[in-house]
C-alpha cells in the first residue's frame, strides 16, 4: 500500500497561513477609507447589537415599539423603535388626511425614506429589512464621504478620528435603525462634499432630496449659500448662474408642501401637525433652563437639556476650528427644533458632522482623544440600553 507523503514543515506553515494571506490580499484591494469605515462599522454594530439584544431580553420593555410587522430575529428587531412604525406604515399605506396612530397624522413625516423602503421591499420582501439595509448603506456611505470631506482641509489622522467619532457619538446607534437619520446624514455630507468641490448642480440635487427627507433640510440652504459666496469671496460680480442650483433645496420642500395642500388643504400641514406631539414655539433658552433645572419634569427633560448644553458648549467653544457654513449647520439644526421643545434633541445631533470634526481636531492631544473616545463609547452603550428598552430618553 502506497503511503501518502507528509507535507514539509514549510508547506504546512504555508497552508496554515493561507487564509491569513488571502484576507491580506483582499484587504489590500479595498480602498483605505472604505476599509476604515467597514472596520468601525462592524466593530460598533456588533457591540451595539449585543447590548440591544441583552437590553430587550432582560428589561422586556415595549413602550416605544408601535405596532408594525416585526422581523422574527431579535438581533434585527432591536433596530426598530418609536418612529419606525410611522415609516413602515407610510411605505405600506402611504399618506392619509385622517389621523392614524394614537390620533396623530402621518403627513408630518417626509416622503423620501418611506419611498426608498417601498422600493427596496420589492427586492427584499420585508419593509423592516429594507429600512435596516437603507440606513446602514447610508451610514457606510456617510463614513466615506466624511473621511474624504475632512481630507480636503486636514490630514489623514484627523480624517480618521472624525470617522471614529461618527461611529462613537452617543446617539449614533440611531444611524443603523429604521429612522431617517442615516439617510439625512448621507445626503447632508454629499451636499457639502460637492459644494467643497464647487459642483453646485450636484450639491443642489442632494439638497433637494435632503429636503424630502426631513424639514431640517431647508435649514441647510443658508449654510450652503454662505459656502457658495465664500468661493466667490462675497463679491456679487463673481456670482454665476450656477447659484440657481441652490434653489433646488426650497423646491424640494415646496413639492411636499403642495402635496400637503392637496391632501389636507393646508400648505404647512406637516408643521401644524407637530402640535399632536406637544410641540409649540417658545423661547429656546427657556426650554433649556426649565429642562436643566427640572422645572418641566425629571429624567428625560433634564438629560435632553444637559445634552444640548454640552453640545452647544462644544460648538461655541470651538467656533474657530470649523468653517462658518459648518458652524451654521449645527446652530440651525439645534436651535430651530429647540424653539419647540427638548424632545428628540439628542437624536437630532447625530447628523451634525462638524461636531465630529471638532472632536477630531481636539483629539490631536492624546489625553483628550482617549478621554472623549471612552466617554462617547460608554454613553452610547448606556443610551442603547434605554432606547431599545422603550425609554423616552432618546426618542
Image (tube, rainbow, N blue to C red):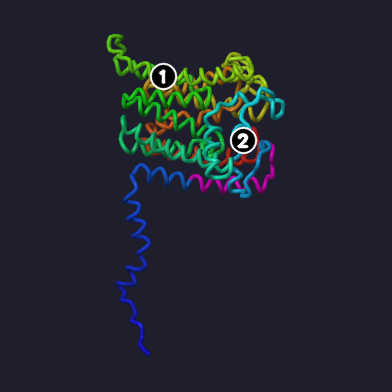
Return the residue found at the far left.
238
Return the residue found at the far bottom.
1
Residue stretch in magenta: 44-63
Query: Who's the residue at 39% across and 17% down the image?
Result: 225
Q: Is residue 380 visible?
A: no
SS assignment for the magenta stretch, majority? helix
Residue 388 belongs to the span the image colors magenta: no
Which residue is denoted by mark 2 in the rendering? Answer: 92
Q: Nearer the viewer, residue 289 or 258?
A: 258
Q: Secondary structure at mark 2?
A: helix
Relative to 154, does residue 121 appear above or below in the rendering? Answer: below
Q: Nearer the viewer, residue 176 or 173?
A: 176
Mark toward the viewer: 1 or 2: 2
Horizontal side, residue 205 vs residue 153: left or right: right
Give x and y (percent) for residue 222. 43, 16
Residue 49 belongs to the span the image colors magenta: yes
Return the residue found at the far top.
237
Crowd around label 1: few <14 · some 14–19 · many ≥20 (10 Å): many
Q: Quadrant of the N terminus?
A: bottom left
Query: Who's the residue at 49% across and 33% down the image?
Result: 183
Give x and y (percent) for residue 163. 41, 38
Query: Who's the residue at 40% across and 35% down the image?
Result: 162
Q: Which of the numbered marks, if any, corresponds to residue 223?
A: 1
Relative to 274, does residue 88 appear above or below in the rendering? Answer: below
Relative to 58, does residue 151 appear above or below in the rendering? Answer: above
Query: Who's the residue at 56% across and 37% down the image?
Result: 178
Q: Earlier in the sequence, mark 1 or mark 2?
A: 2
Q: Which of the numbered marks, if any, corresponds to residue 387?
A: none
Amino acid at each position: 500500500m502506497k503511503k501518502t507523503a507528509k507535507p514539509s514543515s514549510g508547506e504546512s506553515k504555508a497552508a496554515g497561513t493561507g487564509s491569513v494571506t488571502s484576507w491580506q490580499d483582499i484587504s489590500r484591494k479595498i480602498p483605505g477609507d472604505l476599509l476604515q469605515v467597514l472596520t468601525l462599522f462592524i466593530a460598533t454594530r456588533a457591540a451595539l447589537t449585543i447590548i440591544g439584544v441583552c437590553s430587550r431580553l432582560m428589561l422586556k420593555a415595549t413602550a416605544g415599539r408601535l405596532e408594525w410587522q416585526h422581523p422574527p430575529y431579535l438581533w434585527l428587531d432591536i433596530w426598530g423603535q418609536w418612529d419606525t412604525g410611522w415609516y413602515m406604515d407610510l411605505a405600506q399605506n402611504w399618506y392619509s388626511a385622517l389621523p392614524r396612530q394614537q390620533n396623530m397624522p402621518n403627513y408630518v413625516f417626509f416622503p423620501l425614506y418611506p419611498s426608498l423602503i417601498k422600493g427596496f421591499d420589492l427586492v427584499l420582501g420585508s419593509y423592516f429589512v429594507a429600512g435596516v439595509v437603507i440606513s446602514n448603506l447610508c451610514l457606510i456611505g456617510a463614513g466615506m464621504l466624511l473621511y474624504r470631506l475632512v481630507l480636503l482641509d486636514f490630514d489623514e489622522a484627523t480624517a480618521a478620528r472624525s470617522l471614529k467619532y461618527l461611529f462613537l457619538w452617543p446617539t449614533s446607534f440611531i444611524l443603523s435603525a429604521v429612522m431617517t437619520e442615516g439617510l439625512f446624514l448621507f445626503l447632508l455630507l454629499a451636499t457639502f462634499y460637492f459644494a467643497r468641490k464647487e459642483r453646485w448642480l450636484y450639491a443642489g440635487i442632494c439638497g433637494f432630496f435632503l429636503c424630502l427627507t426631513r424639514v431640517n433640510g431647508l435649514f441647510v440652504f443658508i449654510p450652503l449659500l454662505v459656502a457658495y459666496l465664500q468661493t466667490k469671496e462675497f463679491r456679487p460680480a463673481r456670482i454665476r448662474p450656477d447659484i440657481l442650483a441652490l434653489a433646488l433645496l426650497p423646491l424640494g420642500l415646496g413639492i411636499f408642501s403642495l402635496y400637503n395642500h392637496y391632501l389636507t388643504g393646508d400648505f404647512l400641514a406637516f408643521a401644524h401637525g407637530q402640535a399632536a406631539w406637544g410641540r409649540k414655539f417658545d423661547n429656546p433658552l427657556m426650554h433649556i433652563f426649565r429642562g436643566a433645572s427640572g422645572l418641566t419634569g425629571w429624567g428625560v427633560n433634564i438629560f435632553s437639556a444637559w445634552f444640548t448644553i454640552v453640545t452647544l458648549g462644544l460648538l461655541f467653544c470651538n467656533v474657530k476650528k470649523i468653517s462658518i457654513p459648518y458652524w451654521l449647520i449645527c446652530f440651525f439644526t439645534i436651535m430651530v427644533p429647540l424653539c419647540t421643545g427638548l424632545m428628540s434633541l439628542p437624536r437630532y445631533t447625530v447628523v451634525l458632522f462638524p461636531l465630529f470634526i471638532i472632536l477630531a481636531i481636539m483629539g490631536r492631544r492624546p489625553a483628550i482623544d482617549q478621554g472623549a473616545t471612552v466617554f462617547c463609547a460608554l454613553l452610547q452603550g448606556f443610551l442603547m440600553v434605554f432606547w431599545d428598552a422603550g425609554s423616552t430618553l432618546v426618542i
